[in-house]
Amino acid sequence: MTCDKTHGNAWDRVFNEGGYDIQVPDPLVEDLLLRYVPTGQKNALDVGCGTGRHIEILKRFSISVLGLDISHRALLVSRRAHVVAPLVRGDMEHLPFPDALFDIVLAWRVLHLGNISKIQGTFFEIYRVLRPGGVFVASVRNVDNALALLLKSREEPVQSNTYQVTTISDIRGTIYHFFTDEELENLLKDLEILYMHHHELEHTRYTRNIGLKNMFTVFVARKPS
Ligand SMILES: C[S@@+](CC[C@H](N)C(=O)[O-])C[C@H]1O[C@@H](n2cnc3c(N)ncnc32)[C@H](O)[C@@H]1O
C-alpha cells in the first residue's frame, strides 16, 4: 500500500496535539444518508475517517462499515474510543480495495487535503471502488472557507487555491486545496449529482476565533448503474 508519509506524519501530529477537536457526528451526514441512501446496503467506506465519529451512523445504512485514514494516531484514538469496525491505515489516493466493492463512500472534510493531482487521483479511486448505483457523500472546503481566507493572507500558494501550511502550528505541514464549484462539477462529471450546496460547518480550533464563516461545499453523487 502506498502511503504519503510526510502528509501522514503531519496528520499524526495534528491528532497528537489536539489540533482536530471535533468529536460528535455532523448531523448533516445523517440527514443526507436518510435522504439519499436506502437502508440495508452491503458495504460502506469512511475515507479519512479520523477518530471514527461517523462510523456508527454508517452502520445504520450498511451491513459492513470500514474506516480508512492516513493517520496511525487517529486510528489509535478510534480504537480507544471503542469504534467497532475494521480500520485500515491507507492513503485515499490509493484505496486498497477491489473495484465496485462499496455501496456507500463517505468522505467528510478530507478530499481537500492534498494538491490537485492527489485530489484528482482520489476522485478517480472513489469512482473505481463504488459499485454502479453506489452513492458518494462528501464535504470539501471551498474558496470562501475561513481557512482559505486566512491562508491567502499569510502564505504563498503552491498551486491554484492550494497551500502547504507553515504558519498555523496546529496544522503545520498539511496541504489544503480550496474548491470552486466548477472544478468540483468537473471532477464529478461521470457521476449523477443528487445534491450540491454550500454549508457552514463546524469550526476547528484554528479558525474558531477569526470571525469568518467555515464554508464547505457538500455533495451527494451517484455512480450510474
Ligand atoms: C479534518 S479530519 C476529518 C476526519 C473525519 N472525516 C471527520 O469528519 O471527523 C481529516 C482526516 O483525513 C485524514 N487524511 C488526511 N490525508 C489523508 C489521505 N491522503 N488519505 C487518508 N486520510 C487522510 C486525516 O488523518 C484526518 O483524520
Image (cartoon, rainbow, N blue to C red):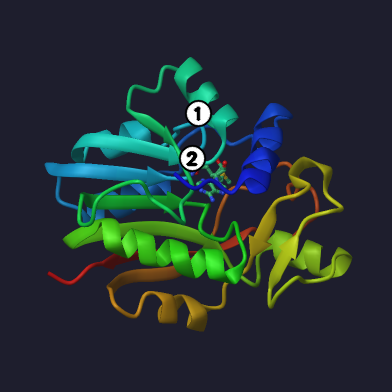
Position of residue 103 measured from the top left corner of the image (x, y, whole percent): 20, 51
Can I make out residue 218 in this image? no
Q: SS class of the residue under badge 2?
A: strand
Residue projecting furthest to the front: 1
Closer-to-camera residue (2/19):
2
Q: Which residue is mark 2?
A: 69
82 above or below 133? above
Q: Which residue is mark 1?
A: 75
Amino acid at the residue labelled 1: Leu
The residue depicted at 54 percent of the width and 64 percent of the height is: 118
Distance, label 1 to label 2, CA atoms, is 7 Å
Amino acid at the residue labelled 2: Asp
Q: Can you tell me which quadrant of the image ligand 1 is in?
A: top right
> Based on the displayed image, in which of its 4 quarters is residue 153 positioned?
bottom right
- What quarter of the picture does the C terminus occupy? bottom left
- Left or right position of 119 against 193: right
The numbered disc on residue 87 is none
Q: Are marks 1 and 2 in contact (CB under 8 Å)?
A: yes
